[in-house]
Amino acid sequence: MQGTKDTDQLPEKVSLYMEKENMARPGSRILAGVSGGADSVCLLAVLLRLGERYGWQIGAVHVNHGLRREAGEDADFTAKLCGRWGVPFFLKEENVGKRAKEWRMSVEEAGRKVRYQAFYEAAERFGADRIAVAHNRNDRAETLLFHLFRGTGLKGMASIRPVRGKIIRPLLDTGREEIEEWLRKNGISWRTDATNETDAYTRNRIRRQVLPYAEREICAEAGIHLAQAAQLLMQTADFVDRKARARLAECLTFQEDQAAGLDVKAFLESEELLQSEMLRLLLERLSEGGKDIGQRHIRDVQALFGRQSGRRLSLPGGLEARRDFGQVVLRREAERAGEGVFTEEPSEAAVPAGTLPGDRDLLEEIRENGIASVRIPGTGTLEITLMRWEKTRGIEQKTYTKWLDYDRIKSLVLRTRRPGDYLAVNDRLQKKSLKEYLIQEKVPAAEREALPLLADGSHVLWVIGHRISSAAKVTESTEKVLQIYLRGGKENG
């Protein structure tokens, strides 16, 4: 590389930062994104210096967004620079304004998407294992403020990361003034993007007005302190993420490709910070990245854990959250209107079938293995054992252990109530609707939807925590019984 004479320790500083963050190994092929501006020209120059030490192969890619009249001049400048320095050069030209309309997003968003697509395409052609971009310490501080002003969680407060997959940011610990001073001392010219000198974009206003004011009127090192805070917040976010993933595994009642359930009791016993992070992890997975999911959506889902069974919440990306039977279920549904609106279940006469995730006929498992167990979210675990009945044993009266006549049962499903449910209430086997029974027992209406039931079709065999149906009671003619024990329930008698 010609035209550069090292006058200070910037390359050494960048080298130490790259080693600290494990950005590239000796012999790596690194593709640098070069716009022609000061930051990216400095990046390319420093990588070439360090490449001699580490045996790196360096290439460059330039993206012409087609948004400015001088964009072609920037591309020519970068191509000539790479030619002088002997750097393989890749050019991508795209009409970002047109793409923004096609993709229905802002020009800023479309530009970023086009840019990174171009980086990955050129990296594949160059055989690069790393893609270097020129974000600096000022960018990190500005992005932290940008996210805070718009509202963000810990992940957003982490701002710009040094490494993200193949993407590395060697200048992230270097200030913009430091970069420009180094270029001037080494006689390296760069292009100035005129759009950076306007207040057309929010980030520009932060860069040109907010941060300079803070550094002038509050603290001269405000930008440095913000970047340091972003680093600390990144480490905190990573720590909380690890803790949240571990706790999430303990709170899940089930997990599928399109849905997951969280045990209400276990979730509410978790630290509040972990609660929001667990929800963020699940929502991001179910919505394929969490696009359009913000902190307010996470707070709304969090509120469901304190609401009664049957409440629902529609979320962006076709997601739905539902409070149901000791758990909150998050599910990806078809696109729906009414985002962020809580709704109630239909009236009692039209309540849809309520079942536990993985709803199955437990009798099939019992016939095969002699035993079965199933968890009731927020309540305990049902343990069911098939055994021969000893007629001399007698029936113990226990609230959370019951015995049912096996030969009178055709199916055994754990679920919540459905229209038409009934049970037999006396030795004459007179039927009473479940609704009527619950009213008679003064079970609060808010609790009825969440009551766990063991049922054989519409015949409720056991209202768990209450009575069994007389039609399934053990009699003198009983030969085999199902002993059902609720582990976690408090026994009486």
Image: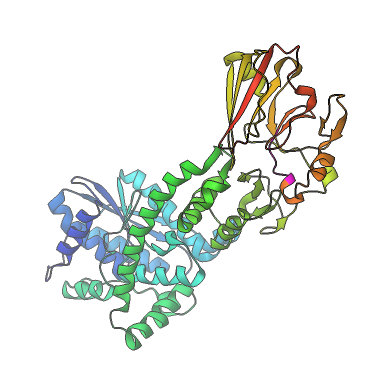
The residue most toward the bottom is 217
The residue nearer to you, when weighing 438 against 227, is 438
Residue 13 sits in quarter? bottom left
Closer to the camera, 126 or 440? 440
Left/right of residue 335 with respect to residue 217 in the rendered view? right
**Tally of numbered tags:** 0
Find residue 281 and report its horizontal and vertical position in percent: 49, 49
Q: Is residue 169 left or right of residue 473?
A: left
**For this view, does 216 lie left or right of residue 275?**
left
Where residue 142 appears, x then y in whole percent?
Answer: 39, 72
Above or below 190: residue 389: above
Q: Is residue 367 above or below residue 1?
A: above
The image quadrant where one finds the C terminus is top right
Image coords of residue 50 (percent x, y): 16, 56
Image coordinates for residue 114, horizontal then vertical, percent: 47, 56
Q: Which residues are magenta?
A: 448-453
Q: Is residue 452 in the magenta section?
A: yes
430 shown above or below 104: above
Q: Residue at x 46, y 41 (%)?
A: 249
Q: Residue at x 36, y 44 (%)?
A: 124
